[in-house]
Image (cartoon, rainbow, N blue to C red):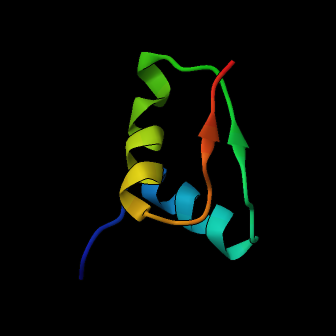
Amino acid sequence: MPRMTAAGAAVEILKREDVNNAFGVPGAAINPFYAALKASGGPCPYSAP
């Protein structure tokens, strides 16, 4: 069975909830989430301040 990271699971939840935009402050701790968001190729663009 393939395993999913927490970041990948968070991205899947955002997609299932039909989230269209994500906003946040970049930093090392959240980089895996940003990588999963980019890798998903989904319709959830990310904006940083």
Left or right? Give the position of 26 relative to 24: left
Q: How many labels does the image show?
A: 0
Between 5 and 48, the residue placed more toward the observer is 48
Q: Position of residue 35 (x, y in %)?
A: 38, 43
Look at the picture and state if 48 lies above or below 35. above
| Residue found 55% across the figure and 67% down from its top | 12
Question: Which residue lies at the image location 43% right of the left edge and 63% below the top edge?
Answer: 41
Choose top left, top right, bottom left or bottom right for residue 5: bottom left
Residue 49 location, quadrant: top right
* In the image, farthest residue toward the bottom: 1
Which residue occupies 46% across, 40% down?
34
Can you say which quadrant of the picture contains the N terminus?
Answer: bottom left
> Measuring 47% from the left and 42% from the top, which residue is drawn there?
33
Foreground residue, 30 or 45? 45
| 8 up-or-down from 42: above or below | above
20 or 34, which is in the foreground? 20
Q: In this view, does 24 lie to the left or right of 33?
A: right
Q: Is residue 33 above or below residue 25?
A: below
Q: Horizontal and vertical percent for residue 48?
A: 63, 25
Q: Position of residue 31 (x, y in %)?
A: 42, 30
Q: Position of residue 9 (x, y in %)?
A: 50, 61
